[in-house]
Amino acid sequence: MGRDVFYITTPIYYANDVPHIGHAYNAVNTDFIARYHRLRGDRVFHLTGTDEHGLKVARAAEAQGLSPQQWVDQMDVRWREVWARLDIGYDDYIRTTERRHYEAVAKILQAVRDNGRGDIYLGHYEGLYCVPCEAYYVEADLLDGSLCPVHERPVESFREDNYFFRLSAYADRLLEHYDAHPEAVQPETRRNEVLSLIRGGLQDFSISRTTFDWGVPLPWDETHVTYVWFDALTNYITAAGYASDQTRFAQLWPANIHSIGKDILRFHAVYWPAMLMAAGVEPPTQVWAHGYLTVGGKKMSKTNLTGIHPFELVDHFGVDSYRYFWIRQISWGSDGDFSWEAMVERHNADLANGLGNLASRVLAMLGSYFDGVVPSAALEGCEADLPSVISDAAERYDAHMLAVELQSAVVTVWSIVDRLNGYLVEKEPWKTAKDPDRRPELASVLFAAAESLRILAVLIQPIMPAAAERLWDQLGLPGTAAEQRVPEAVAWGQIEPGTVTHKGESLFPRLEA
Ligand code: MSP
């Protein structure tokens, strides 16, 4: 890693509204990466939070007859309750209205202004603004000459005196940076998009607003508040201690991965590194842009009833199936579509009939043939190729996770489920059990099956932390699945004969279509 801590971030979500499954898509996959790194024994710092300033939030508050602060305080509860229920194990939660953040924004602004290159200057802006994007557009970018290309709704004409950031001066340095660090924007298609944006020429952007006051005041001119994107991006260094703790900052920064959606790539891969360069701070190591979710093929929105709150699905599928679906269904980096049918299908095929059924069969056989007690493997060789299949899969899993190939990582774990199912079909322990002379063979096969389940519980922990603990518990194992470490915990042969298992409730009850 080249530093002490694996630092991974989600974007900070706009507090103008409650979460929908598009936001949670980012949160779940990012949490999977963070948890996997913890499982490897890395020190992890997973940051998330909310973006609470700007016109979009101010207008949402106004529409409710509340002050922006009252509104974001209400929204705060609504965001955190979702992350709690989805088992999002963040290490820090930042709100841009916090004092620590004001201090960091003031510090970076001052550092850029004082860098001796005139990177912040006063100017005048007239342009076309999209409030949902919190960004200006030039006419050539618009759909039909008047609609925002992202939100497909009319832009507004704004004019103000603003301070500007001299982004145009950073094109060469950005290109050099991306040339030296090809991995700094992923996937490859996004990297190419960023390179062509930069090569196409960069325009300075305004970093302050005077037409409303819901934001961080500029340290040298309090009649201006900081542009919401300049404010928001800074959250990543606020939480790392930029303005509060230099030792900590040196350990955490630069962040290993900014996990974001492709719609906010320009801000993260062009504005942000340039802002940092101007302030004399290293750019992030990697920006990883995932795809966009649609529902029934349509963009999610309140008006066409496709803005699905995560609880609508979690209530039905449970948190583990919810997390599994989003990680397994869509390749991280590609766009994807949600449909209820696809989610039921995945749940039943991979979880209820797959891992869940496998676990309950093995536990039931341990119960019927050995009173639930794990027997010793009396006969050599009965485990067949299970140890090598598992160690090979665990290695590939690790490689996929380090390459942020999340879907392939899960598929790799399920290759163990398939192999263990095949193993049971070959060994037919239910037949062996009928012959008292074949007890040693029966014991050896069930030992191997129980041991494989133990390893599966470790490997699924970052994907489905709650299900992993249920399985761990049913296997009667000491401690928790979460405190295991790879590769040690996936080495073959660790379940102790004599361990008392219990079948318990099925891990993933089958759902009706
Ligand atoms: N506040 C900014 C980010 C500032 S980060 C310094 C913002 N917020 S957002 O709430 O609009 O979006 C947060 C994240 O959710 C983004 O990564 C965005 O890509 C993601 N998604 C929002 N809708 C989405 C889908 N329909 N599909 C996938 N991800 C989506 O942008």
Image (tube, grey):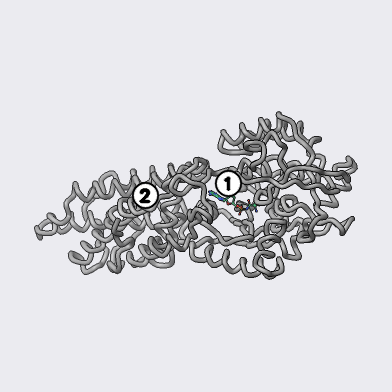
Q: Position of residue 199 (x, y in %)?
A: 71, 29
Q: How far apart are marks 1 and 2 (CA)?
A: 22 Å
Q: In this view, does 399 lie to the left or right of 493?
A: right
Numbered circle sitting on residue 342 = 2
Q: In this view, does 342 lie to the left or right of 194?
A: left
155 in relation to 319, above or below: above
Q: Is mark 2 within 8 Å of ligand 1?
A: no
Instruction: Say which amino acid is labelled 2.
Output: Ala
Mark 1 residue element: strand
Numbered circle sitting on residue 261 = 1
Packing grade of label 2 (10 A; few <14, some 14-19, many >=20) is few
Q: Can residue 178 be seen in this view?
A: yes
The residue at 24%/57% (across/down) is: 446
Q: In this view, does 373 lie to the left or right of 253?
A: left
Badge 1 or badge 2: first in the primary sequence: 1
Q: Where is residue 180 in the image (x, y as percent from the top left)?
A: 68, 32
Q: Is mark 1 within 8 Å of ligand 1?
A: yes
- In the rendered image, which quarter is residue 125 located in? top right
Q: In this view, does 313 lie to the left or right of 247?
A: left
Q: Position of residue 246 (x, y in %)?
A: 77, 56
